[in-house]
Amino acid sequence: GDSVTQMEGPVTLSEEAFLTINCTYTATGYPSLFWYVQYPGEGLQLLLKATKADDKGSNKGFEATYRKETTSFHLEKGSVQVSDSAVYFCALSDRSGGGADGLTFGKGTHLIIQP
Amino acid sequence: NAGVTQTPKFQVLKTGQSMTLQCAQDMNHNSMYWYRQDPGMGLRLIYYSASEGTTDKGEVPNGYNVSRLNKREFSLRLESAAPSQTSVYFCASRRDRVQETQYFGPGTRLLVL
């Protein structure tokens, strides 16, 4: 079945540091890929997405590129802020039509940004 | 436009008690979902409803039932709560398989003693 693997945290960085959170996936078809962010005590919010190979999703300074050859969708940001502290989830949506109609999530990466 | 709303926000149950978690969306979405979130496990799909009148099991359906009451509302019922069902429950919705982005509610934190 489908699966998503992402680096587990916590990941602790200083403000203005460069961020990379790795995400790799396995899927039977050609999935769409997502990054969701969860701030403390809140639900998940879509951060960015990509629907086909070589697409780049971007939002709020975050970027991720859909790499079919390496089955990866790594999240990057050039200069993080304290307000970026949250849990980040990589997820996929399998459009092959088989299996459950829902998102498959990674376990989440807790990011802590120190001033 | 409230998006996806969930009630209650927090609930404490004793083992064996029953309860229903409520979810509603005002975005005219066809598909709705229930997930549970546990530490170190990410989110796992419990049940989903691809369209009004249909429901299907997800990855972890045991101990739960669902009802798609109408296009707006999708409830999750625990008939006999167990400590293993202590979790945070999230409802989500999306327009359809073409528009894949799911929108999440704020969650219900459930503690079963």
Image (cartoon, coloured by chain):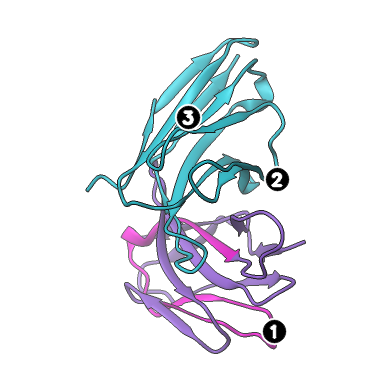
Chain colours: A purple, B cyan
Crowding at mark 1 (Cα within 10 Å: few <14, some 14-19, many 20+): few
Q: Quadrant of residue A67?
A: bottom right
**What's under tag 3, amino acid-wise?**
Arg
Question: Label 3: chain?
Answer: B
**What's under tag 1, amino acid-wise?**
Thr
* Residue found at x 39% / y 25%: B8
Question: Is residue A39 rendered magenta in the image?
Answer: no
**Residue on which disc 2 sits:** B59
The relative height of residue B12 versus residue A15 in the rendered view (above or below) is above
Location of residue A27 in the rendering, given as x and y in whole percent from the top left corner: 72, 70
The relative height of residue A44 versus residue A25 in the rendered view (above or below) is above
Q: Quadrant of residue B9?
A: top left
On whether disc 3 and disc 2 are found on a single subunit, the reply is: yes
Q: Secondary structure at mark 3?
A: strand
**Residue on which disc 1 sits:** A70
Magenta segment: A63-92
Number of marks in the rendered image:
3
How far apart are the alpha carbons under marks 1 and 3? Answer: 37 Å
Which is closer to the viewer, label 3 or label 2? 2
Which of A77 and B50 lies nearest the eye of the viewer?
B50
Question: Label 2: chain?
Answer: B
Location of residue A39 in the rendering, given as x and y in whole percent from the top left corner: 39, 50
Residue B60 visible from this viewpoint: yes
**Residue extending furthest left?**
B1
**Residue on which disc 3 sits:** B109
Residue A115 visible from this viewpoint: no
Which is closer to the viewer, label 1 or label 2? 2
Location of residue B46 in the rendering, given as x and y in whole percent from the top left corner: 63, 40
Which label sits on residue A81? Answer: none
